[in-house]
């Protein structure tokens, strides 16, 4: 029986050493007494949640955060025992599942807390109270609501408040005025709470990197744990070198010479203006290499070569500067020799933010986890949940 973890020449490499380095730099930056909460929602921004979560915990994170309850339960099933906070809205009828898996939820409104209490049958569930200081997404907004929360807690011992937090809308922008307004609003709203007993957090990567102190006793570290900057405009405020963890590779599956006037791919929209070498790469928009990336460069033999014609669902073609044998490595994100294609470059081409790119690389692309340059593990949901190599 064949037992390889995948049978395609396309893969993403996740450098867990880079994740650990970013976490330990951040931990030093925020100080020993401030908790680092590693944000591993959306399969760790497409990197692989359990693997990244374990690496972050080993490097000094105290707990993990996800967006939905299923992500938290999946991490529990894969052996993560550290505290996990669900940052998003979990329907109150599922509080018993959260209690069963020892997952911390977000209490984001008076009604949610009332309903959650009603759905508890003798169990206790822990939660962090979400305060809306200006994002207008989730959270209690007024001092009256905070008083109602305190009252509900007094009446329902099954609801255990372990933290309080807010989220900034503009922490990654140069102009700090809206950010500072939110900060003041948060401080005012949480004043009646027993803050000494709570995990109090407001900073995401951007705020945590920019401010050394003043973000209470925990920081939610997402994008920069993956070695990516929260935005271009705060680049000069990042206090240590971020090391990108995600690279994306494939190989040439087929190579041919085409003649002047011949066309490539759907719509015959690309026509050669001279005789040239064309390579086929088995990556397409179903892998998350979106059609809009038509014409962008990939790296082959340490050189930039452009995608020729439309990107298909499962393949694209590339202009080659010479003949290369099938099997030659193609790097879509990452480095070859002196050349690098960054996540930011791809995000720019797609007119979006770097956050979106690894999330978009689909689960059809196996994730290979490396530590100190050696492959530790491979994850390919198509064939098996988890394989050790
Ligand atoms: C995703 C998320 C974060 C992480 O933000 P980064 O900018 O990736 O560091 C923090 N807090 C909340 C509430 C989030 O939803």
Image: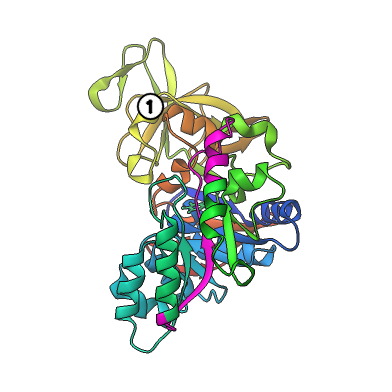
Outermost residue to the left: 267
| Residue in the image at 29% along x and 27% along y | 265
In the rendered image, residue 182 lying in the magenta stretch gets the answer yes
Neighbour tally class for label 1: few under 14, some 14-19, many 20 plus, Cα within 10 Å: some
The spot of residue 304 in percent (x, y) is 55, 25
* Location of residue 175 (image quadrant): top right
Can you identify the residue that label 1 sits on?
A: 294
User: Which colour scheme appears in the figure?
Assistant: rainbow
Residues in magenta, as a range: 155-183
Side of 19 relative to 255 (left or right):
right
Side of 348 relative to 286 (left or right):
right
The spot of residue 3 in percent (x, y) is 46, 68
Quadrant of the frame with the C terminus = bottom right
* Location of residue 291 (image quadrant): top left
Q: Nearer the viewer, residue 347 or 182?
A: 182
Is residue 286 placed above or below 73 in the rendered structure? above
| Residue in the image at 30% along x and 19% along y | 263
| Residue in the image at 48% along x and 28% along y | 348
Q: Secondary structure at mark 1?
A: loop
The spot of residue 89 in percent (x, y) is 36, 61
Q: Nearer the viewer, residue 301 or 241?
A: 241
Query: Disc 1 beta carbon < 8 A from ligand 1?
Result: no
The spot of residue 279 in percent (x, y) is 43, 30
Residue 36 seen by the camera? yes
In the rendered image, residue 77 lying in the magenta stretch gets the answer no
Side of 56 relative to 141 (left or right):
right
Residue 301 seen by the camera? no
Q: Nearer the viewer, residue 240 or 173?
A: 173
Quadrant of the frame with the N terminus = bottom left
């Amino acid at each position: 029986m064949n037992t390889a973890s995948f049978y395609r020449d396309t893969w993403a490499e996740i450098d867990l050493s880079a994740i650990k380095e970013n976490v330990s730099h951040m931990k030093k930056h925020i100080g020993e007494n401030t908790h680092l909460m590693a944000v591993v929602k959306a399969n760790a921004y497409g990197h692989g949640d359990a693997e990244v979560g374990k690496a972050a915990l080993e490097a000094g994170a105290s707990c993990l955060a996800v967006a939905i309850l299923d992500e938290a339960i999946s991490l529990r099933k894969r052996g993560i025992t550290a505290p996990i906070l669900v940052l998003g809205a979990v329907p109150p009828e599922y509080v018993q599942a959260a209690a069963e898996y020892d997952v911390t939820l977000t209490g984001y409104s008076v009604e949610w807390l009332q309903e959650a209490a009603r759905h508890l049958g003798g169990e206790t569930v822990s939660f962090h109270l979400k305060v809306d200081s200006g994002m207008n997404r989730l959270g209690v907004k007024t001092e009256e609501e905070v008083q109602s929360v305190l009252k509900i807690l007094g009446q329902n011992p099954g609801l255990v408040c372990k933290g309080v937090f807010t989220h900034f809308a503009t922490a990654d922008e140069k102009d700090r005025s809206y950010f500072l307004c939110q900060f003041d609003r948060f401080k005012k709203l949480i004043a009646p709470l027993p803050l000494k007993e709570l995990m109090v957090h407001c900073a995401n990567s951007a705020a945590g990197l920019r401010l050394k102190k003043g973000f209470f006793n925990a920081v939610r570290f997402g994008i920069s744990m993956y070695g990516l900057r929260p935005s271009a405009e705060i680049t000069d405020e990042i206090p240590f070198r971020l090391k990108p963890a995600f690279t994306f590779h494939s190989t040439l599956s087929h190579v041919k010479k085409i003649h002047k006037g011949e066309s490539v791919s759907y719509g015959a929209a690309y026509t050669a203006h001279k005789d040239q070498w064309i390579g086929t790469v088995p990556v397409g928009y179903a892998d998350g290499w979106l059609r809009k990336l038509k014409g962008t460069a990939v790296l082959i033999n340490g050189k930039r070569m452009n995608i020729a014609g439309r990107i298909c669902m499962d393949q694209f073609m590339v202009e080659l500067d010479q003949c290369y044998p099938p099997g030659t490595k193609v790097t879509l994100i990452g480095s070859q020799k002196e050349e690098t294609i960054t996540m930011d470059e791809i995000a720019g081409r797609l007119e979006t933010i770097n956050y979106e790119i690894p999330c978009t690389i689909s689960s059809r692309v196996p994730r290979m986890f490396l530590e100190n340059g050696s492959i530790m593990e491979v994850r390919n949901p198509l064939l098996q949940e988890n394989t050790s190599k």
